[in-house]
Amino acid sequence: MPVLTEKSNILELIPKDLNKEVFETIISKNDIKIERIISYGQATTEFKWYSQESDEWVILLKGEAILSFLDEEDIRLKAGDYINIQAFKKHKVSWTLPNQESIWLAVHY
């Protein structure tokens, strides 16, 4: 985890190996966790749904993605789009761009 006074750039220092989605914690304190997620064509497996104990605010900083919610319509995101996901709301990533990084900033609170 970087030191809070250390400068960094969320769009840089992308790992070379993107065969799996990358989850990097930027800050974790008390009931708040901020993480960078890097997708490169990955999607959540067909039968897996996330159902988290905390709310999650997420913004797509680069790329494109589709979020699916159980029994609701899919939401397509492009760079700059953000969404707040309530705790225990079943969701998953159905699609991300296959030939470019999709970079997310997620705030769990």
Image (spheres, grey):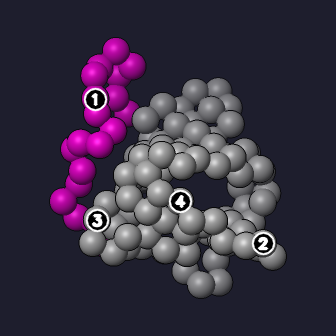
Vertical position of residue 5 compared to residue 100: above or below: above
Query: Which label sits in the foreground, 1 or 3?
Result: 3
Secondary-structure class at tag 4: strand
Secondary-structure class at tag 3: loop
Name the residue type under label 3: Gln
Which stretch is magenta? 1-22
Label located before the other in sequence (3 or 2): 2
The CA span between labels 1 and 4 is 25 Å
Residue lying at 48% horizontally and 46% vertically, measured from the top left: 80
Q: Which residue is mark 1?
A: 8
Looking at the rendering, which quadrant does residue 47 occupy?
Answer: bottom right
Mark linked to residue 77: 4
The 10 Å Cα crowd at callout 3, few under 14, some 14 to 19, many 20 or more, is: some
Mark linked to residue 72: 2
Q: Which residue is mark 3?
A: 100
Tell me if residue 5 is in the magenta stretch. yes
Vertical position of residue 54 compared to residue 20: above or below: above
Is mark 4 in CB contact (under 8 Å) with mark 2? Answer: no
Vertical position of residue 10 compared to residue 42: above or below: above
Secondary-structure class at tag 1: loop
The CA span between labels 4 and 2 is 15 Å
The CA span between labels 3 and 2 is 27 Å
Query: Which label sits in the foreground, 1 or 4?
Result: 4
Label located before the other in sequence (3 or 4): 4
The 10 Å Cα crowd at callout 4, few under 14, some 14 to 19, many 20 or more, is: some
Residue 90 x, y percent position in the rendering: 74, 66
Label located before the other in sequence (1 or 4): 1
The CA span between labels 1 and 2 is 37 Å
